[in-house]
Image (cartoon, grey):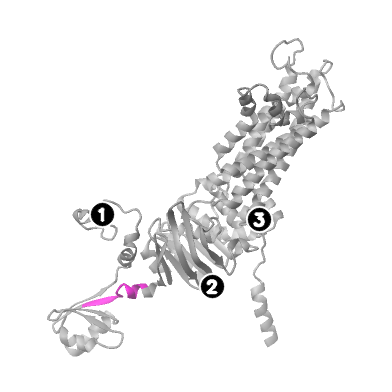
Amino acid sequence: MIELQHLVKRYGDKTAVDDLHFTVKPGVVTGFLGPNGAGKSTTMRMILGLDAPTSGSVTVNGKRYSQHAAPLQEVGALLEARSIHPGRSAYNHLLALALTHGIPRRRVDEVIELTGLAKVAKKRAGAFSLGMGQRLGIAAALLGDPQTIMLDEPVNGLDPEGVLWIRTLLTDLAEQGRTVFVSSHLMSEMALTATNLVIIGRGRLMADTTVAGFIDQAGGDSVKVVSADSARLRELLLGPDVTVTGEAGSETLAVSGLSARQIGQTAADAGIAVFELTPQAVSLEEAFMTLTGDTVEYRSNAGSASHAGAPEGSVAA
Amino acid sequence: MSTTLTATEAAAPAKRAEYKVTFARVVRSEWSKFLSLRSTWITLAVAALLLVGIGIMGAYRYDPTALRGPSADAHDAVTIALRSTELAQLALGVLGVLATAGEYTTGLIRSTLAAVPKRLPVLGAKVLVYFGVVLVVATAGAFLSFLGGEPFLHGKAIALTLSSSGVLRCLFGAGLYLALIAVLGAALGMLVRSVAGGISLLVVLLMLLPVFLDILPSSWKPDVSPYLPGLEGGAGGSIIALHQESGTLSPGAGLAVLCAWVVAALIGAAYRLLRSDS
């Protein structure tokens, strides 16, 4: 459980984190989403007490992080930037951390095994690839068998196999009843792993919701139906939790609340010819960009963030 | 049967290992960090080699008839044995800087402080480990330097033995001086959080301040010079010299002054460590 209370961080006149107020609950994966520079890493550093908040407070499992007798047992964190000495081996890095808490060497071997680092554990960590470095960071996060796991952009630099491994790991940890807080700037990644969603832009809270809620808000999944008698089909499909939209006189309908299979069956039973039946997945990425679009700090000049394919003229206008 | 079940259920949460951060454990962690870096070993070896090698070489090449050069201003065997302190202090000071500033330049400090968020134990443990290691190595080096040079000076006017008055005090003093310099380096490194900055500050304090003094009005020098931390006419020089030159402090007073410098640097380091974001 992580609780943020009106957390603010200013650097000079720049406000990196602006009145963040939310709770990360145990038992589910909570995605922490925002464009680059939105303040995700700063927030996570404040949770760990590495940066002091300008105002407000943040507690982990009821106490400030630094007040815990065994902090690594409360929160295991992977920060975005590398936090290792390149000249030390992975094993010795983990051992040095373990020794501060009296964590046995057996546990060091366990997390090395768990993260698939056994073959390179005695090598200098400076020679690690980005993916290996991430695995070492995750090994350090799991070292104290913590109740809360906080990972900053964990899939960065991982190969597809590694990405899959992270997803499974996060889901497993949450199923064990732990609090899992994962940041990302990719909505698509979060949609696959997270249950809850906290979205920030320019340090401000944009949404504190669930992935399902966010999909609904974005319009939900719908099915496009092109049929010979759309007026009659509409009457047949309508019901509780089902919405059907479409222009009068048009052959095309957009149906949400029913699967393509159910719609096809209804049409067949009524003898209505169906020309097209296409499930339309809502673009979460686009909905996310619409939400945070105004807050993107570093927008490229070549094309707007929300419409990568738009003609260049529209950006200038 | 039901009682056994309840018992196992109650035992389950307690089965979770109880860990706790203690100062002794932080010291063990810092000790393991010290052992597991090749660069610390190399720096330590270089310092020891300088300390012993230059001392013995100085004794071997000693020429009482020389009018200039190192032999001419060597008044006693201790001066020859400990002349290498001047160079060894740089290697050992750098060792201290690397211990703290190195954590910031590599980013390791984030892992370290996430494990020990109260922060001060980290500084305390580093100081303890580096002070201890350098004290042992540098004292051994000073003795080896003196004993290794003894045969070459045998029978000459400046020859001394371990039992000569003040010799032991000088040799132990050199070990203590170098250990304090390593701590000073660690404190400066944590204060400026940069290896280059820490080393520069160390060089300024130990070697350049006496040179700057020459620019100032000459009447100031006798009042300021003895209170500088370094060897050249400063507090450090008083600690390791067999005979005090006029205008310098006594060995005890020199040690007190050097300790004051180290404590001041440590207070600055602790303040920055506690107050600044990492």
Do dots 1 and 3 share one subunit? yes
Q: How many marks?
A: 3
Given residues B48 and B194, the one toward you in this image is B194
Q: Earlier in the sequence, mark 1 or mark 2?
A: 2
Given residues A115 and A300, the one toward you in this image is A300
In the rendered view, does B244 fall on the left or right side of B127? Answer: right
Dot 1 and dot 3 residues touching (CB under 8 Å): no
Q: Which residue is mark 3?
A: A99
Q: Residue at x 67, y 66 (%)?
A: B18
Most distant residue in the left direction? A249
Is A271 located above or below residue A188 in the figure?
A: below
Q: Earlier in the sequence, mark 1 or mark 3?
A: 3
User: CA separation, marks 1 and 2?
Assistant: 44 Å
Q: Residue at x 13, y 79 (%)?
A: A250
Q: Is residue B3 visible?
A: yes
- Specify start and end residues of the magenta stretch as a single range: A214-224
* Subunit that carries the residue with mark 1: A
Q: Which residue is mark 1?
A: A303
Given residues A62 and A244, the one toward you in this image is A62
- Report the amino acid beneath label 3: Leu
Q: Mark 1: which secondary structure? A: loop
Q: Mark 3: which secondary structure? A: helix
Disc nearest the viewer among 1 and 3: 1
Is B151 magenta? The answer is no
Residue B99 image point, x, y percent: 62, 43
- Report the amino acid beneath label 1: Gly
The quadrant in which the N terminus of chain A is found is bottom right
Q: Which residue is mark 2?
A: A176
- Report the amino acid beneath label 2: Gln
